[in-house]
Amino acid sequence: MSEPPGALTILIVDNDVGFLWWLGELFTQTGYSAIPALNCNQAIAAIKKFSLKVDLLFVNPILTGVVGFVQSLQGSRRHLRVVLIQEGSPTSSGPASPGFRYDATLTRPSGWEPISREDWLQKLRTLVQQLETAHSG
């Protein structure tokens, strides 16, 4: 049906080092190859250094240079799926247009909100499966 989980490479680009590493750890635990980067320049360097074939990009849309970075990746990788990392807010009505195509959003938990590791593992598995199904269909 779809590729085995280990075949997917997930690039996570976010300036919140704690969330970045936590998310990467969850993806790794789920069987994916997760590459963290604190900014777009670091992400570009990792892609070049390791000759990465990025399948999924989780990116914070407020980072400097993000529009050009994502558009460049989308131009060279037709299979790429993009997920926006949003700030958690009960009043947010969804993302404004970030200047590039994206396939889904992931809302970052707020600092005061209790976080269940198992719930997040399931949330990430479901999100990746939905993106894979949409891509193969």
Image (cartoon, rainbow, N blue to C red):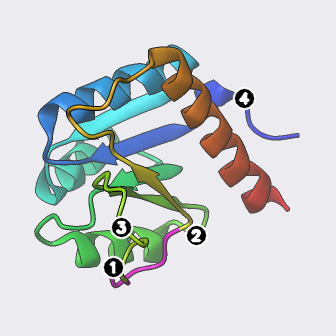
* Amino acid carrying mark 2 in the image: Arg
Q: Residue furthest front?
A: 91
Q: Which mark is residue 78?
A: 2
Report the residue marked by disc 1: 98
Residue 55 rendering spot, x and y as whole percentages: 53, 50
Q: Are marks 2 and 1 in contact (CB under 8 Å)?
A: no
Whether tag 3 and tag 1 are in contact, CB under 8 A, the answer is no
**What range of the chain is rendered magenta?**
97-102
Q: CA distance from mark 4 to mark 3?
A: 35 Å
Magenta stretch encompasses residue 101: yes
- Prevalent SS, magenta region: loop
Which residue is denoted by mark 4 in the rendering?
Answer: 4
- Which amino acid lies under the numbered mark 4 shown in the image of this protein? Pro
At 37% from the left and 44% from the top, the residue drawn is: 11
* Residue 44 horizontal side relative to residue 106, left or right: left
Is there CB contact under 8 Å for labels 4 and 3? no
Q: Secondary structure at mark 1?
A: loop
Q: Quadrant of the N terminus?
A: top right
- Of mark 3 and mark 1, the one earlier in the sequence is 3
Judge depth for marks 2 and 1 and give the one in front: 1
Q: Position of residue 105 (x, y in %)?
A: 47, 58
